Amino acid sequence: MSLEFIGLIGPQEASESQAPRGPAVDLEFIRAFAQAQEYGGFDKALLAVNTSAADSLIIASHVAAYTEKLGLLVAHRPGFQAPTFAARQFATLDHLSRGRASINVITGGDSGDLQRDGDFLDKDARYARTSEYLDVVKQTWTATTPFNHEGPHYRVEDNLTLIKPLQKPHVPIYFSGASDAAVEVAARHADVYMMWGEPLEQVRERIAKVRRAAAKYGREKHIRFSLSLRPILGATEDEAWARAERILADAKVLHEQRAGKRRELNVGKNNIGSSRLVELASQKVVHDKRLWTAIAALTGAAGNSTSLVGTPDQVAEAALEYYNLGVTTFLFRGFDQLRDAVEYGQELLPRIRNLVAQQAQGKRANG
């Protein structure tokens, strides 16, 4: 199976345990962060979306100009612009980056953040809109003659967009969401289904569920799976766990400072993925030897917030267990973003690649 690593590029250095530093759009940090991950062997970097942050698609265009190989996985929320318009934007980015664009379709997330941009649809309606949105986007990318579309959410007449993605048949679609409605949309549309870091058994069950749903569309062998984690490394296991505790202590200080601020509150209900992580964190702090949930418990799992803690060898071995379940893409980002990205490139990614290669070689040798 193929193996892919995704990092993160944000407009400013910050995390749950690190107060924002520098300007809101820190050009020097963006450049250093992107180039560190490209040099370190990441295949792609996620550019996330949030109503209070800089626009991810514009930052991706900026990053494309001074990187050569790093893929650009741009988070995108359907419903805030016409799907034909978004299709042209992503096709254009694919040309500017010489075929490095991907789209990370974000339907859910914190309901409060959606409402800040004027989206008040309930969850099921949002996913129904997303499915239709992707129908139109993909048709815009691939149609060779003018097409019409009329559905519950979108109406298009006589569209023929001349700018097509360099990648064929279209820009890769990454999709996340833990609800039944999300799984159904992923089954129809996703090239890669993205999950937050959960214990091995839960990941096994989720992969099986998505594959069963994809089988209805003849896509069970097409869809791939991604897992998002926050590795915390140390020269020894004790050092790694001590660092995890320092991160938690710093995160608690920042969490208390932010308490009660309007933009730190969840307006509406959290998504199903967050609820799952919070439930796991309530059961125990550590699952499967080194899946650490303390940050998820502290923050209400507002995003990718579970960690694999240990030496580079131990974390690589834990990642291999997920790989053997069917996870072929890993999204790794740290709490000390730039430092961790460099360390992942030096210490973690090569070990995981070597383990996967050794395992494949052993299987071939054994027939």
Image (cartoon, rainbow, N blue to C red):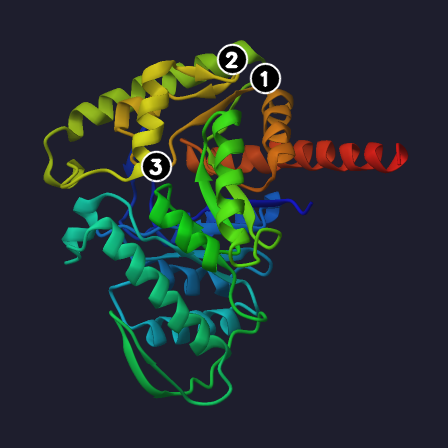
Mark 2 residue element: helix
Name which residue lies at 43% across and 78% down. 140
Q: CA distance from mark 2 to mark 1?
A: 6 Å
Badge 2 or badge 3: first in the primary sequence: 2
Residue 146 appears left or right of 110 = right
Q: Quadrant of residue 281?
A: top left
Name which residue lies at 45% across and 12% down. 242
Q: Quadrant of residue 306?
A: top left
> Mark 1 or 3, which is nearer the eye?
3
Q: Residue furthest front?
A: 216
- Residue 212, how many percent across, how many down? 52, 46
Mark 3 residue element: helix
Residue 194 appears left or right of 129 = right
Nearest the viewer among 4 and 349 is: 4
Q: CA distance from mark 2 to mark 3?
A: 30 Å
Residue 339 appears left or right of 179 = right
> Mark 2 or 3, which is nearer the eye?
3
- Residue 95, how many percent across, how many down? 52, 74
Q: Amino acid at mark 2?
A: Glu
Circle 2 sits on which residue? Answer: 239
Picture quarter with the C terminus? top right
* CB-based contact (under 8 Å), mark 2 and mark 1: yes
Residue 10 in view (yes/no)? no
Mark 1 residue element: loop
Picture quarter with the N terminus? top right
Circle 1 sits on which residue? Answer: 235
Dot label at residue 273? 3
Nearest the viewer among 209 and 108 is: 209
Name which residue lies at 27% across and 23% down. 298
Dot label at residue 170? none
